[in-house]
Amino acid sequence: MKIGIMLPPKEKNNGGINRVAYNTLRNMEQMSMPHELVMLGEGYPNLSYPHIDLLPSYMQMNHLSFTLSAHPMDLVHTYYHPIDFSDKISCKRVMTIYDLYTIANPQWFSKTYIDFQDRIMRESALKADRIIAISEATKGDIVHYYGIPEEKIKVVYLGVPELFQKQVESKDFSCPDRYLLSVSAIAQNKNQAGLVEAFLVYKERHPEDDVKLVLVGAMRQPEEIVALLEKAGSCREDVLYTGYVSDEELLQWYDRATAFAYPSFYEGFGLPILEAMTRKKAVISSNTTSMPEVGGDAVCYCDPARIESITDAITKVLQDDGYRAELEKKAEVQAGKFSYARAARETLAIYDELLLG
């Protein structure tokens, strides 16, 4: 059976969906299967699968229809939702949905944008033969917002790249002696402003602690954080921002951190939580959406909507060395439950179910 894998556009610094697709496909290479996989799009040059250059977008339905007419497939799986092609083409459809962030959080978007996203996602989801959700929380949102039966949706958890599981050579690296790390793009849903505010409260209550807060990631909406720091007096120097860093640099930031914090409002999965646990770090995380699925009993949870709750979690993890050490031990065990090898096996099982019965 021939399976087309629809890939996202390449990025300068591949992350997110590109990372999920690449690592899952890389693990599939090592598995025996009765199918031929073809990458629809530019493809990844260090993978052995053939590829078809044309990458259709959801605004160009005819492009994908023409591609499938010229190169018939038994199944198409899109890692870059949504997907659509002519109903005259006989082909199974599999769609990975990472979250319904826009629809579930209308307060952050215009109605026009929400309606557009809802329409294209809903139409694709209803036509799909199987939907892969990356968490039970995302599956629940799909059922709730789209009314799609649960049996049509399979949960396949993410993993972390092999690099994050290996010991890395320690290089010259300038960082504070003691710091709380957070990794994510600075955007409203990530609640970095809430983390900064809670950290500044912690510093006011524990002036003897020289700990810093280090924010790693692309800065998209920094206004709230800038406003907070302008009012923070001398404490503003305790909040550091690195911008985007390479994977090698990121591992250094993880490994040298005292603890990790991720009080996001909404996540389809929460990959930085898994990355931090893989590096054996004590993690502070929100108690909402998918994050308890990822963190299990290895995380100190907080209510992201309450600054006092975030501050209490920071205090507990930074002030109680025994508790922090306990979380570090649990982190390694919890992280071991997730892998791209498992994701590849479970994805192949979905293909087999649809194609082989």
Image (cartoon, helix red, strand yellow):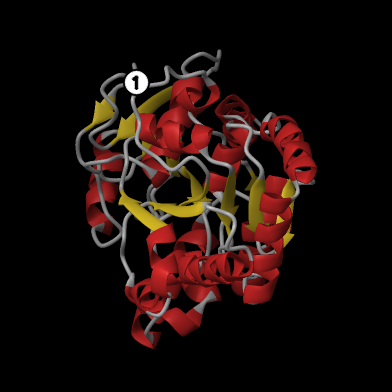
Kindly tell me whether residue 151 is visible in this rendering.
no
Can residue 61 be seen by looking at this rendering? yes
Compared to residue 86, the image places residue 76 above or below, namely above
Q: Position of residue 191 (x, y in %)?
A: 50, 68
Write down the residue under mark 1: 49
Q: Quarter-wise, where is residue 324 in the image? A: top right
Count residues near mark 1 (Cα–Cα under 10 Å), then give few for <14, some for 14-19, many for 20+.
some
- Left or right: residue 109 compared with residue 256: left
Q: Position of residue 357 (x, y in %)?
A: 67, 32
**Which residue shows up at 58% across the image and 24% down it?**
341
For residue 138, which quarter of the picture?
A: bottom right
Residue 17 percent across, percent down from the top left: 41, 45
Relative image position of residue 264 (x, y in whole percent): 56, 63
Tell me which residue sits at (25%, 49%) in the image: 56
What is the residue that sits farthest to the bottom in this orientation? 111
Q: In this view, does 148 lie above or below 278?
A: below
Q: Which amino acid does label 1 sit on?
A: Tyr
In the rendered structure, the answer to whether residue 148 lies left or right of residue 227 reads right
Viewer-side residue, 338 vs 58: 338
Determine the secondary structure under disc 1. Answer: loop
- Seen at 42% across and 60% down, the residue is 239
